[in-house]
Amino acid sequence: MTATMLSDGMPINYVSDSITLSRLCAKWQQEPCLAIDTEFERTNTFYARLGLLQIADRDACYIIDPLQIEDWQAFVELLTNPDCMLVLHSCSEDLNLIQTFFDCLPVSIFDTQIAAAFLDIGFSTSYQSLVEILLGIEVAKDETRSDWIKRPLSDKQVLYAATDVRYLLQIRELLDNQIEQKGMSAWFRAECEQQLIVAKAVEDYSQWQNLYAGISNAWRLNKTGLQALRLLCVWREQKARQRNKPRSWIVKDNDLLNLCSVTGRFLCEGVLTMDMLINAEGVDQRFLQRNARELLTLLTEQTNMQEVDFSLLKKPLSAPLRKKLKNCQQVAKEKAKELEISPELLGRKRHLLELVRSVERNGQLQWLGELSGWRRQLLEPEISKVFSATD
């Protein structure tokens, strides 16, 4: 393990063997908090490729090289230790990478970007901005698009990577104290726990069954076309993971939509042939030539054509409901101003849109997912008035 240091004297330790990592993990098991960050490459793959793992404790920064370490068991035990809180900034991509690389998720996290939103510093404040705002220290951004897979790493890369975790523990303490003073600690903890729930759901096969609802204009398809779309979205998800390629490299959304528009019509008529598939208009011919036979088998096997939930579709709102959505956004904005938190944290448009859609589907407000819990507590009294009012 070679060492260097940051300009403020904080040591940087480069870890490239399993024995050293295991020894450090034994030490870190006793720490109440650790800062963590990742550097990765994801240009032509489905799964991000881990290039570096950075850790900071009270004494030093550690650059862990995943390209050389083979035994991660001690680190996995650290991740799943509920008594050691991991401090991250903007954790969603890091959590996804941790889950797919280590096959687990942390138990306890503190996201400094979310914490900043609770203090109305900004909804998506960058790490560099937060360090400057809270500590008055300017952090360089020049290695943001660096190649983290190539070896050897340059001195600039090592310094940049170490700096990304250097100040997280200091920032956490400052933010945590201010959130506690505002009486919002329980809300913040719930939000961090929600990040873990969302990260876990991404890798949950059962969630893939609803991917069709996220395809733009899926609501235009007939029932059979929508059943085909549900099936093909799951098929694409599986292929993307098996081949480790981006979804759009398997087949683009618009190609799926056009294909299901055609097949939905033919399947309604009780017949679908290879020629019909290959000649489907508006669909990438290379995709069809490669996959037509497999798709034909998939689409013509009746047991595969399961029912779909039309209520999940993103059909455009009617004019009255668009007005209700706008009023809901105004409620969230005013309440956030009153509480001095970021408006987007309290009520993002896409979450409020789902709330409005629940009224359209079921005739009543359904506070699900991220709008449940503390958000519902704050928003329900005024938003209920929005829907009880006669326009």
Image (spheres, rainbow, N blue to C red):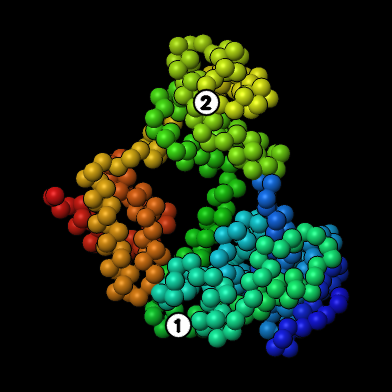
User: Label 2's element?
Assistant: loop
Residue drawn at the location 74% of the way across and 60% of the way down: 147
Decide if residue 102 is in sight here: no
x, y (%) of residue 175? Answer: 50, 80
Number of callouts = 2
Front residue of 10 and 79: 10
Give the crowd class for mark 1: few <14, some 14-19, many >=20 residues within 10 Å.
some
x, y (%) of residue 298? Answer: 60, 22
Residue drawn at the location 77% of the way across and 59% of the way down: 149
Question: Which residue in the rendered view is the most extreme toward the front?
Answer: 142
Q: Is residue 172 above or below residue 22?
A: below
**Dividing the picture into quarters, in which one does residue 358 lie?**
top left
Label whose residue precedes the other's in the sequence (1 or 2): 1
Q: Amino acid at mark 1?
A: Gln
Residue drawn at the location 13% of the way across and 50% of the way down: 390
Kindly identify which residue carries mark 1.
178
Kindly identify which residue carries mark 2.
282
x, y (%) of residue 380? Answer: 27, 60
Residue drawn at the location 59% of the way across and 84% of the way down: 137
Question: Which residue in the rendered view is the most extreme toward the left?
Answer: 390
Question: Which residue in the rendered view is the most extreme toward the bottom?
Answer: 9
Q: Amino acid at mark 2?
A: Gly
